[in-house]
Image (spheres, grey):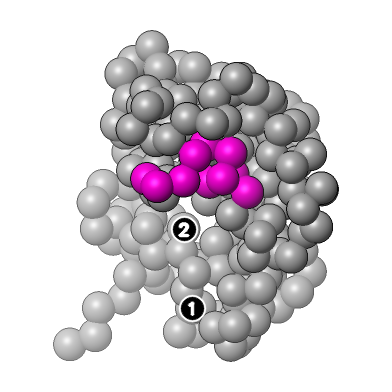
Amino acid sequence: MAVHALVDIDLDIYEGEYLAIMGASGSGKSTLMHILGCLDAPTSGEYFLKGQEISHYEPDQLAKLRSQEVGFVFQQFNLLPRLTAAQNVELPLLYSNVPLDRREEIVEDTLAKVGLADRGHHRPNELSGGESQRVAIARAMANNPAILLADEPTGNLDSKTEEEIMALLDELNNQGRTVIVVTHDETVAHHAKRTVHLHDGRIV
C-alpha cells in the first residue's frame, strides 16, 4: 500500500516572506521542507523556485541549486566538532570555490552579524547552545541564499535563548530574506507573518 506523504499541496511562497510550517509528527512537514529545500524531488506535480521548474532535476542539479539558493538551520546545529566556528561558517564557501581572501571577509562579516565576532576561533564544544545555533545560522547565510530554511531551530534551547535566536531570524527577514520555519511550537510560529498547517499530508 502506497503512503502519500503530501497530497494536493498548492502553496505559493513569496520573496521576502516569513512563513511557518506547522504540523504534528507524521503530518508531512519534513517532506515538504525537503522538497522546498531541494533535498528531495516530488514524485508528481511541479515545484518552481525563482521561476525555474525543478521537479525533474537530477540530484547533482538539485545539489548545485541548493548550495546557491537555500541555507539550512537544523535543531541539532550540525556543526563539525573538529572545526572552529569560523571554519564551520567557511565550509559552504569552500564548496562554492570562493577565493580565500573573499572567504575570510565573508566569514568575519557573517559572524559579526550574528553577534559572534569574538568567538570565531572557538570549537563547538566551547560554545553554548545559543552560540552554536548562531554559528549554524551564519553558516547558512554565508553564500547569501535566497531562502533561509530553519527546521525546529530552537528545539534544543532554553526559552531565553529561543527568543534571542528568533529575534535574529526576525531581523534577517526584516532585511529582506525569505525565512521558512518548520516547527511544532506555537511560540516560534507566532514570529512568522503567515502559518501553514499540515495534517496527514494536506494543508488545512
- Extreme residue toward the left, this view: 1
What residue does disc 1 label? Answer: 42
Query: What residue range appears in magenta?
Result: 81-90
Q: Is residue 108 left or right of residue 182?
A: right
Instruction: State the residue at coordinates (45%, 17%).
Output: 163
State if disc 2 and disc 1 touch (CB < 8 Å): no
In the rendering, at what x and y percent does residue 33 appear? 46, 58
Residue 73, can we see it? no
Classify 22 as above or below 4.
Answer: above
Picture quarter with the N terminus: bottom left
Amino acid type for the residue under numbered disc 2: Met
**For the residue labelled by badge 2, is the local secondary structure a helix, a strand or a loop?**
helix
Q: Is residue 195 left or right of residue 141?
A: left
Q: Main secondary structure of the magenta part?
A: helix
Q: Is residue 169 magenta?
A: no
Instruction: State the residue at coordinates (64%, 30%).
Output: 111
**CA distance separating discs 1 and 2:** 11 Å
Residue 157, can we see it? yes
Q: Is residue 150 left or right of residue 172?
A: left
What residue does disc 2 label? Answer: 33
Instruction: State the residue at coordinates (60%, 20%).
Output: 118
Q: Is residue 134 left or right of residue 31?
A: right
In the rendering, at what x and y percent does residue 68 appear? 71, 62
Name the image quarter holding residue 97: bottom right
Instruction: State the residue at coordinates (26%, 47%).
Output: 24
In the rendering, at what x and y percent does residue 89 appear? 59, 44
Question: Closest to the observer: 171 or 141?
Answer: 141
Amino acid type for the residue under numbered disc 1: Pro
